[in-house]
Amino acid sequence: MDQHSLNVPISIKIASGLWVTYGGLIGIGALMMLFMVDSASDGNTNVILVTALLLSLFGGFFIYFGLATFRGQLKDVLGNSIGVIVYGVALIYSNMDFLNISSGSALIASGVLVLINRSDYLSFKNS
């Protein structure tokens, strides 16, 4: 880690660490789905493969933007924070179970945390 990334505000690092963790968990879920392809004997293998691919894509986005935010490589964090809030709300309303509500709430909280501390991030980027 270089000296520049050490000065990123801690609240931004916490939120982006959550994004990286969430992306990794999505990736693990996608891998688990790929292991289910062999057991799907009813012809749903294509659906499982496409779903696993899309999950991997979402997980990759979360990991990439989480790491870029953590390292302070982005010009602004407005798009990331709004995107995470929208994704968290969609996640909660997609299936009202405990897992979606808790992970969606954590994503919303991290997006709000980044929005609140956006000025700190921008002053860090301009220094």
Image: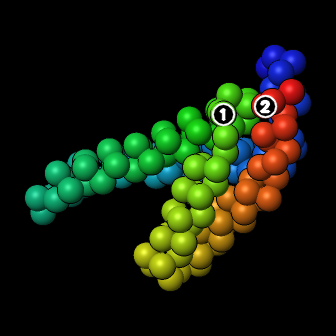
Residue plotted at (80% across, 41% down): 121
Q: In the rendering, at what x and y percent does residue 118 appear?
A: 77, 49
Apparent side of residue 13 relative to residue 22 in the rendered image (left or right):
right
Label 2 with label 1: CB-CB less than 8 Å? yes
Give the class, few, some or many, for how many residues have Cα within 10 Å of label 2's Cα (few <14, many ≥20): some
Q: In the rendering, at what x and y percent does residue 98 appear?
A: 59, 78
- Distance Cα–Cα, label 2 vs label 1: 7 Å
Q: Which residue is mark 1?
A: 75
Residue plotted at (82% across, 52% down): 117
Residue plotted at (40% across, 50% down): 55
Apparent side of residue 9 relative to residue 90 in the rendered image (left or right):
right
Give the class, few, some or many, for how many residues have Cα within 10 Å of label 1's Cα (few <14, many ≥20): few
- Which colour scheme appears in the figure? rainbow
Q: Which residue is mark 2?
A: 125
Q: In the rendering, at what x and y percent does residue 85 appear?
A: 60, 63
Q: Residue furthest top?
A: 2
